[in-house]
Image (tube, grey):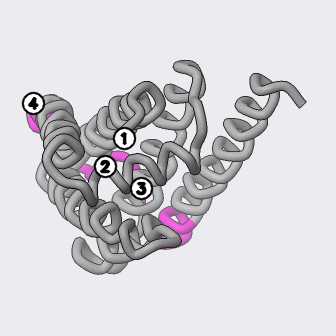
Amino acid sequence: MTEAAKSWSRAGLVLTIYLAMAAAGLVWSSWRGDSSVWRVEGREDVQVLLGIVAGVVLGLGFVFASRLAVHRFEWARALHRDMRALLGPLPDAEVVVLAAASSLGEEIFFRGALLPAIGLVASSLVFAMLHVGPKLRYLPWTFSSLVAGLVFGQLFLWSGDLTGPVVAHFTVNLLNLRYLSTHEMR
């Protein structure tokens, strides 16, 4: 199998997983009687637009923090090396697919469906548990996922719309996956 075929095979698997996650969130939300998993009724459009702007700013803030950590701390460089070895080279198109699928699937499930059912803290803890790695050095990734879950969840509660959290999540994943793929840490 060629590298391109392996890459798109991985992208297809990821798409399937996140499509299933989004579908589970939609079905669960509908089963509970929620009118929409995406938007809370009664929110003003201006608040939704501010949520989108906040999503961009928050996403860039998380990216800045991860870059700062990689350049200042050995544990972050070691985590970068491990993640890079795990994922291998990622073509730009695959980075976009992975970032889009994960941000949509995870936000629909964790913020759109799970958060209204079990609350901000519990849904963020479950989100963090999805981001547990095979080694102890992955704990900062898990902790940052907990913080991201809390921040993205609070953004959803404030704006009443999933677009801001999806934009934030997409920004983080797109820029961090691209950086991971193009920068080798020694």
The residue at the point 51 percent across, 49 percent down is 105
Q: Are marks 1 and 2 in contact (CB under 8 Å)?
A: yes
Residue at disc 3, secondary structure: loop
**Kind of residue at disc 1:** Arg
Amino acid at pointer 3: Ser
Residue 186's label in the rendered image is 1
Q: Is residue 42 magenta?
A: yes
CB contact under 8 Å: marks 4 and 2: no
Mark number, residue 46: 4
Q: Secondary structure at mark 4?
A: helix
In the rendered image, residue 136, in percent from the top left (x then y), is placed at 39, 75
Residue behind mark 3: 35
The residue at 71%/40% (across/down) is 10
* Amino acid type, callout 2: Arg
Answer few, some or many: residues within 10 Å of disc 2's Cα (few below 14, many 20 plus, some between 14 and 19). some
Q: CA distance from mark 3 to mark 1?
A: 50 Å
The residue singled out by tag 2 in the image is 77
What whole-number distance in Å separates the C-alpha atoms at marks 4 and 2? 40 Å
Q: Position of residue 43 (x, y in %)?
A: 16, 44
Cα distance in 3D space between marks 1 and 2: 8 Å
Left or right of 90 in this view: 107: left
Query: In the rendered view, would you say 17 is above or below 27?
Result: above
